[in-house]
Amino acid sequence: MERNNTTSETWQSSIPLLVHKANNKGPSSSSSSSIPTVLMLTTLVAVLGSYVFGSAVGYSSPSQSGIMHDLNLALAQYSIFGSILTIGAMIGAILSGTVADYVGRRLAMGFAEVFCIFGWVAISFAKDAWWLYVGRLFVGFGIGLLSYVVPVYVAEITPKNLRGGFTTVHQLMICIGMSLTYLMGANLNWRVVSLIGTIPCLVQLLSRPFIPDSPRWLSKVDRVKESDSALQHLRGKNADVYQEATEIREYIETLQQQTEASLVGLFQLQYLKSLTVGVGLMILQQFGGINGIIFYANSIFISAGFSESIGTVAMVVVKIPMTTLGVFLMDKSGRRPLLLVSAVGTCLGCFLAALSFFLQDLHKWKELSPVLALVGVLIYVGSYSIGMGAIPWVIMSEIFPINVKGSAGSFVTFVNWLCSWIVSYAFNFLMSWSSAGTFFIFSGVCGLTVVFVARLVPETKGRTLEQIQASLNSYSTKK
């Protein structure tokens, strides 16, 4: 007990020194305007896992009629197939931090892709519902791992001036995977689409040996020479990485004075603000309705009296450019402004969709209400894509110290998938109760998000991971 108190005092007293050192570093190579080719290629390999994530989420909507017809499934059976993805993802999320900390970020991605490949193949050759369930569960497990490992890995390999934009590419690739799978599902047999789903898995699996592991993880496991070598490789052979490498080592040496935090250990006062921000953003992201709207977009448009094919194409047309815009704005405008704009937009979009269904219930403006529903959904999807889709994952990858990142990241990712399952499972029941009421609830949650971001979420733009984590934990301890 005495040792823990001493360690805690040492940690607290070290924080101001670390922040002072980090804030007073001279200009480093990470602030250079040029982006090393190795860094770009490494990030591209990593975010192939994000594409797999997106394709898995986007698969169920366009494939529904084909799978139900070919395998003679009832709606209840297909609902199990759709929602079991999130069950697998929750299991993967629980283990994600432990796996990533034990074997490293790079091996964890490969481990996840093996499960995804098996899952896609099982779906493609399924002769009955059970093989569909097994395949979907395995794909879910894989993307549960990837949803944590990819943004954390990208955040740990990029310099502070590029970290926001590079980490947001995770969401862009999810968006591209989802959108392309929507389009393929509308034009190709569902078995062919599932086989195509194995291609990015295989590419990442085969490319993984050629990318470096996270310098921060290597330093954490006392592989200091490999950490320095990986950092030099990522920044370019002529870059001066001395300051950045020293800062990483100093911070990790301080953290190693503490034991690795268990799940229970996360709920200490010093981690309270980080945990509140990370968990809060994930809950609000999912309870804002995104997975209900994405999973069941076709049925929403049909209920609103609008063409499902036009609605789906319109979503794709809006989603990709807005997510791309978010990537470019992330390190220019900062996290908080984008989050606030995004949350206001999702609130407005859900309100317009709710108003459309409300007018339908009153049998008024029958010609206008379907268009209003489409406009509302498109505003929602566009606004979500520019901020709420990516930024919670960016912030999650930034705010936790590396000694708790495994357990904290697993917990936050698990909460995200649990909320995702609740929304995707309850969505059809809510729509049966009241379509207008469902979207009014989502609009209210998005309104709460604005308040939460304004009051609690810190700006992390332009700060090193060590600065962010030290200041947050210092703040929590003082409070």
Image (cartoon, rainbow, N blue to C red):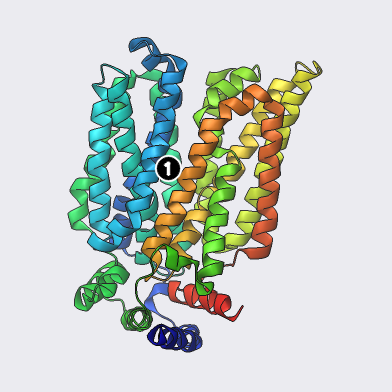
Observer-nearest of 174 and 4? 4
Observer-nearest of 101 and 263? 263
| 104 in relation to 8, above or below | above
Observer-nearest of 58 and 337? 58
Q: Quadrant of the N terminus?
A: bottom left
Residue 426 rendering spot, x and y as whole percentages:
56, 31
Regarding residue 318, the answer to whether it shows in the image is yes
Apparent side of residue 90 relative to residue 206 in the rendered image (left or right) = right
| 151 in relation to 295, above or below | below
Instruction: List the single residue furthest toward the front.
Output: 1
Apparent side of residue 468 relative to residue 100 in the rendered image (left or right) = right
Q: Residue at x 29, y 68 (%)?
A: 217
Residue 132 rendering spot, x and y as whole percentages:
31, 24
Q: Quadrant of residue 178?
A: top left
Q: Residue at x 46, y 40 (%)?
A: 175
Apparent side of residue 453 relative to residue 84 in the rendered image (left or right) = right
At mark 1, the secondary structure is: helix
**Residue type (three-letter) at the residue carrying disc 1:** Ile
Regarding residue 463, the answer to whether it shows in the image is no
| 171 in relation to 191, above or below | below
Q: Quadrant of the C terminus?
A: bottom right
Q: Residue at x 34, y 60 (%)?
A: 153
- The residue carrying pointer 1 sits among few (fewer than 14), some (14 to 19) or many (20 or more) residues within 10 Å by Cα, namely many
Tell me how many marks there are.
Answer: 1
Residue 45 rendering spot, x and y as whole percentages:
29, 51
Apparent side of residue 399 relative to residue 206 in the rendered image (left or right) = right
- The residue beneath circle 1 is 174
Residue 34 rendering spot, x and y as whole percentages:
38, 67
Q: Quadrant of residue 458?
A: bottom right
